[in-house]
Amino acid sequence: MRRNRMVAATAGAALVATLAACAPDDGPPTLNWYINSDNGGQAQIAAECTEAADGAYTIETVLLPRDAAAQREQLARRLAAEDRSIDLMSLDPPFIPELSEPGFLAPIPDDVAEAVSENVVQGSLDSATWNDELVAIPFWANTQLLWYRESVVEEAGLDMSQPVTWDQLIEVATDQDRYLAVQGIKGESLTVWINALIASAGGEIITNPGSSAEDTELGLETDAGREAARILEQIGSEGLGGPGLPTSDESASLRLFQGDDASFMVNWPFVWTSTQQAVDDGLLDQSVLDDIGWALYPAVTEGTDSAPPVGGINLGVGAFSEHTDLAFEAAQCIVTPEHQAFYMVNDGNPASNTEAYEDAEVQETFPMYEMIRDSLEQAAPRPQTPLYNEISTGLQETWYPVSDVNPDTSPEAATELITAVLRGERLL
Amino acid sequence: MLAAPAFIVMVAVTLYPIVQAFIDSLSRIRLTAPDANEFVGFGNYAVVLTDPVFWSAMGVTLFITVVTVLVELVIGFALALVMHRAIQNLRGALRTAILVPYGIITVVSAFAWFYAFDISSGYVNSWFDWVPGVSEDLNWFASQGTSLFVIMASEIWKTTPFISLLLLAGLAQVPGELEEAAKVDGATSWQVFKRVIVPNMKAAIMVAVLFRALDAFRIFDNVFVMTNGANGTTVLSLLAYRTSIGRLEIGLGSAVSVLLFLSVVVICFVAIKLFKVDLSSARGGN
């Protein structure tokens, strides 16, 4: 490894020298903010914060790959090589412990931690915390809602002001011969669904988060795990997810939901702005938009609150950055409630700060803003562990395709595979 | 001496990474746990070689290699003959048309094929619903057989021009008088092809097959874009990628890469040995 480091350091030094040669000699330091792709909101915020800094620093955005797994790969590899060019990063929450554990994220000063935690929804704080410390700065927080077609619900006589269960959805979809838009693709979306089902049933995928790879204990072989498997299996094997289920991600399920055979969908709030956009562009009929209603994520057991998925982006400050103090300043500017409100309206991504929901434009763009906020407070994060990637991929290996999930064998198969992988005895 | 600079560059860009990968493959290295590296000897190889995931990836890779190379050889030969026989003023346009797929970046062609067959945005299902087994509800990327069909079709479409180009070069070397002599003796077209053209092009055919087999064995882009290894379509390169890059398990991933490299060496070795035998026997036969 030492030789690797030396080579990396030499290459890095050469690169820095080249870059330095291009940069003007004086002037404010440039902070590189590695962002995920969006509608341009982060670049806009970067420009505004640069202006607000009044010459103290300039923020430049660097675009990461489109999907979350590829973002993690790139950041982890760069940070492992002690990349000094990473000042700020937009991080997908499940990967935060993995980057925090080896010290890739600069520790957040207490005063900053206190300031950025104020008025922030619980789901978002949980997702930015590792080993009881805030290691990333909550920016925006995603959660899934249950979206339904009013016409379908009316025909079924379902009271959507009360929490509904997955079994009710299955029953309505079966009776009316319609599709449930869910994410059955072999990917992170499937893990999101499985985790929400298990958490809603009162279980958790890892029962002792924070333990070493060898000692990690899984909570799949429990009633909650089996119940989650039962729901998946029923939706899969009865064809309720449509023929596209094995390859259905969030966008594909939105297309299914916008179609004629739709009934319900679980999905992130971007679907609302996206559908509106489609109507504005003349691709969809206004009647489709008018027919869409929303409710809290479906429960597994009647009378027990559901645990909706939580996602979003938190900001990390690179441990090898030469300007960590400025980066924390910039991060605080980025996550102000005003910027979060702007981002929510512009990019369709919900704010993590409850104050942002008081914004008139937010309330106008997202008529369901209260529900999003409530859902975020009720949400359960995906298992927090530096080994998240193995857990998630292991689940996808054994619980895919959804139609082949078996409540009696799948939890055991997943536990066996993941445990062996964590011990280094199996490939994935 | 004159070759020294080239030799040094070769060593730097090929030998160094290979040696480094081999050294890495002997340890348990995880990028996000820099303090937990430990030397495990050939432990990683034991894990890989006893794992069904590796052998299934090996099987799928071999299957893709054999099928695509065989199909490409047949189609490639036909195209080469067409290009060879085409009348003078059509030749240029024809060759360009045939070579277009090869000029397209693999990732781009993979996406084009993916979107064509995709159940929600594709047109293949509605165009070909008269074919038995194809309907609006067919999800090509939901099972192993159909996924591999699309992956291989895309691979074949993309690289057949390459093989036909190599075969065209071989065709040009077949002496015209031999063909004429055979025709004068009353040989049918098929007999000319089988007895005169093919034996005279054995060397070109072997080179084409070897190059394509090595390429096909390292297939990555099409699988990565279309299924990312779902439904039993994981190939060896993808497994190496997923372990090294996805899981950041450098040690285990290097072991898979080294085994992939060794497989390529074996194919090379076998082919070159066969190739030499063929070359001499072809000459002896003539």
Image: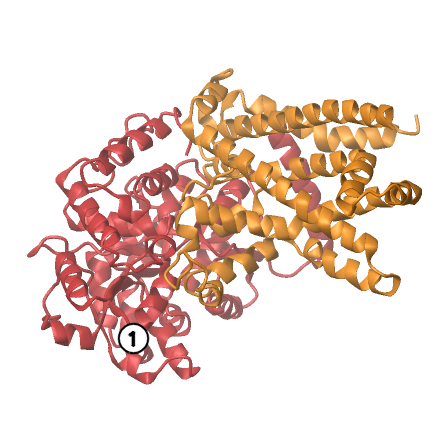
Residue at the (24%, 51%) spot, across then down:
A237
Name the residue carrying label 1.
A366
Left or right: B111 as drawn, with respect to A118: right
Residue A99: image quadrant is top left
Residue A329 shows in this picture: yes
Looking at the figure, which quarter contains the C terminus of chain B?
Answer: top right
| In the image, residue A416 above or below residue B172 | above
Residue at the (47%, 29%) spot, across then down:
B54
In x, y percent, where is residue A123? 26, 55
In x, y percent, where is residue A408? 18, 37
Chain ID, red in image = A
Graded by Cα atoms within 10 Å as few (under 14), some (14 to 19) or many (20 or more), the crowding at tag 1 reads many
Q: How many marks?
A: 1
Type of amino acid at the residue the image marks with label 1? Phe
Residue A16 shows in this picture: no
Left or right: A122 as drawn, with respect to B28: left
Instruction: State the SS at label 1.
Output: loop
**Residue projecting furthest to the front:** B186
Residue at the (70%, 23%) spot, across then down:
B269
Left or right: A228 as drawn, with respect to B153: left
Looking at the figure, which quarter contains the N terminus of chain B?
Answer: top right
| In the image, residue A265 above or below residue B53 | below
Chain ID, orange in image = B
In x, y percent, where is residue B258? 58, 26
Residue B285: image quadrant is top right
